[in-house]
Image: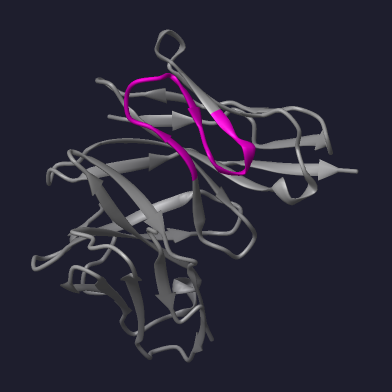
Amino acid sequence: AQSVTQPDIHITVSEGASLELRCNYSYGATPYLFWYVQSPGQGLQLLLKYFSGDTLVQGIKGFEAEFKRSQSSFNLRKPSVHWSDAAEYFCAVGGLGSGGYQKVTFGTGTKLQVIP
Amino acid sequence: GAVVSQHPSRVICKSGTSVKIECRSLDFQATTMFWYRQFPKQSLMLMATSNEGSKATYEQGVEKDKFLINHASLTLSTLTVTSAHPEDSSFYICSATQREGMRETQYFGPGTRLLVL
């Protein structure tokens, strides 16, 4: 069964500092990996995704993530955090469900707080 | 592209009434839509998978007679919470999948906040 672990429940960074959010996954084959961001009371917005190819993936809002198969990780990074980045971030892994569709499993989320 | 809408965004109802939530993919056709429930400060819990023209597949522990799902077209799925009770109060989020060959990406709606009094 596929699973996702986000070991950090809550992270606080200063505005302008770099950011790395950790994500580890478990999946039997090559995974499809996603990062989503959720602002309070809102749905989820796709930041970036990895299907295959280049293991360093660029996303929206200046985010990037690197797929490391040897570490079963897909950490999200941003070189300089803005106050508007404060939100909850979910890592997700996709795999085939029993009906042939792609079933996505979400991590428990990391809440990012940005301080001035 | 890949915009998903949900309606209503917020609903308050009395206990015992039914509530219908709509999920629409606005600029793409989605063969599969998913319904999630999110409790405060928690991750998303998949409730069911909705495929156009067929019965929904419910996750273990989700009552199919309680949460009726209809996927009438490639751009519309509805979730009806029947005989709602206060414990059904939650944030309900739908997603629609956009297919790229054999790969699918889920795009999410903005969510519906349900409060049952």
Left of A86 or right of it: where is B85? left
Q: Tell how many labels.
A: 0
Task: Please tell me whether residue B100 is drawn above or below residue A2 in the rendered image.
Answer: below
Residue in the picture at 35% in, 87% down = B18
From this viewpoint, is residue B55 visible?
yes
Left or right: B2 with respect to A41? left
Quarter of the picture containing the C terminus of chain B is: bottom right
Q: Residue furthest right?
A: A116
Residue at point 71%, 42% (across, down)? A112
Q: Which residue appears farthest toward the top when viewing the image?
A: A70
Residue A1 coordinates in the image, percent (x, y):
27, 29
A49 lies left or right of B102: right
| Front residue (pair A67, A62) | A62
**Taking A109 as reference, is B28 above or below it?**
below
Q: Quadrant of residue A105?
A: top left
| Residue A51: image location, x then y, percent | 33, 30
Please give the name of the residue rendered at 28% of the width and 52% of the height, measured from the top-left corner: B98
Q: Is residue B60 magenta?
A: no
In the image, the segment drawn in magenta is A47-64
User: Does the rendering let one see residue A86?
Assistant: no
